[in-house]
Image (spheres, helix red, strand yellow):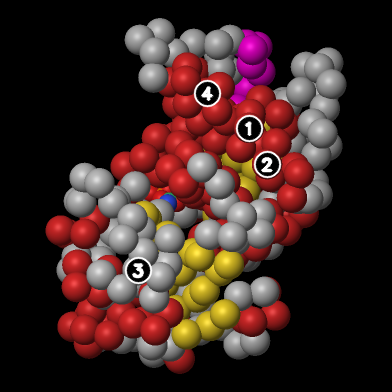
Amino acid sequence: HRHLTGISGLQPHEIAFLLDEAEQWVDLNRRASKHDDRLAGLTLINAFFENSTRTLLSFEIAGKRLGADVVNMHAAQSSVKKGETLIDTAMTLNAMRADIIVIRHSSSGAVQLIADKVDCPVLNAGDGWHEHPTQALLDALTIRRRKGRIANLRVAICGDLLHSRVARSNILALTALAAEVRVIAPPTLMPPAIERMGVTPFTDFDAGIEGADVVMMLRLQNERMAGGFIPSPREYHALYGLTAERLERAAPDALVMHPGPMNRGIEIDSNVADDPVRSAITEQVEMGVAVRMACLDVLTRRRRGVEGWA
Ligand code: CP
């Protein structure tokens, strides 16, 4: 089966193909009746071993709009709490003859481990510090629709780069689509040798944001900092928070993005996050449903006897 464990396995034309496929679902989702039953008879299992609002709900909505039978497994209410291993849990889902499994897990690589064991396509909904491919696709779709293109745009990705699967997937997708990507983080939250990913690192926010067409803010992930350096929220906001004043340095029509959930007043000020013209944050959520519909459709095509993806 073809899985979607990361952007790293995709060619640029495959990324563009998934974005093109998502466009039809943006249109459908804006109609009063939002159904296309091409996944009727198929079973989608969303197995979430880590909390989520946007990703879980949008995969559930995406599956239902495509007519699939959708089942959600929340680890906190499952036999994982009785000590069942990840592989045993995966084999249990497999024995129920799932047709596609969506997984979120706190360990990097957990999704690949499951993908190697089950008999259906597996979609990564975020694994540890590794990747969150559908987030990068929905971000790319948001940028492409707002700006008309991705190539040659200057995109600044700012904040907790070290712990961010969103940043890794976005860097891979945006550089593949020929954007100029800058990353801005305090030295303690900047991954070592990140310039090898084809990005330019900055530790000075004001220098990094200069002329940016897109300013993508990241959440400060305190839950992943156990044993490490935890910045003080006040100091972090003073040096790396996106304020209206700082945004002045970006391009005049710069787009403000955040994957959510936001720490308002820490990495982003409310007046910037809620700016009706510049902020694309709620649009990102809308694009999330469309992109996930595209991924569910494309990954199950062979199973449905339809020509597989490009
Ligand atoms: N952006 C994102 O993945 O949000 P959730 O954790 O709420 O799914």
Decide: few, some or many residues near mark 3? Use Cα within 10 Å; few <14, some 14-19, many ≥20: many
Q: Are marks 1 and 3 in contact (CB under 8 Å)?
A: no
| Magenta region | 38-45
Residue 43 is a magenta residue: yes
Name the amino acid, label 1.
Asp
Name the amino acid, label 2.
Ala
Residue drawn at 42 percent across, 79 percent down: 208
Q: Is residue 70 visible?
A: no
- For discs 2 and 3, the disc positioned in front in the rendered view: 3
The earlier-in-sequence mark between 4 and 3 is 4
Q: Is residue 157 left or right of residue 53?
A: right
- For discs 4 and 3, the disc positioned in front in the rendered view: 3
- In the picture shown, does residue 77 fall above or below 45? below
Residue drawn at 29 percent across, 51 percent down: 279
The earlier-in-sequence mark between 4 and 2 is 2
For disc 1, the marked residue is 20
Q: Are marks 4 and 3 in contact (CB under 8 Å)?
A: no
Name the amino acid, label 3.
Ala
Residue 310 lies, in percent from the top left, at 82, 34
For disc 4, the marked residue is 25
Name the amino acid, label 4.
Trp
- In the picture shown, does residue 221 fall above or below 304? below
Per the model, the C-alpha gap separating discs 4 and 2 is: 15 Å
Q: Nearer the viewer, residue 179 or 70?
A: 179
- Which label belongs to residue 250? 3
For disc 2, the marked residue is 16
Residue drawn at 47 percent across, 85 percent down: 202
> Which quadrant of the view contains residue 296?
top right
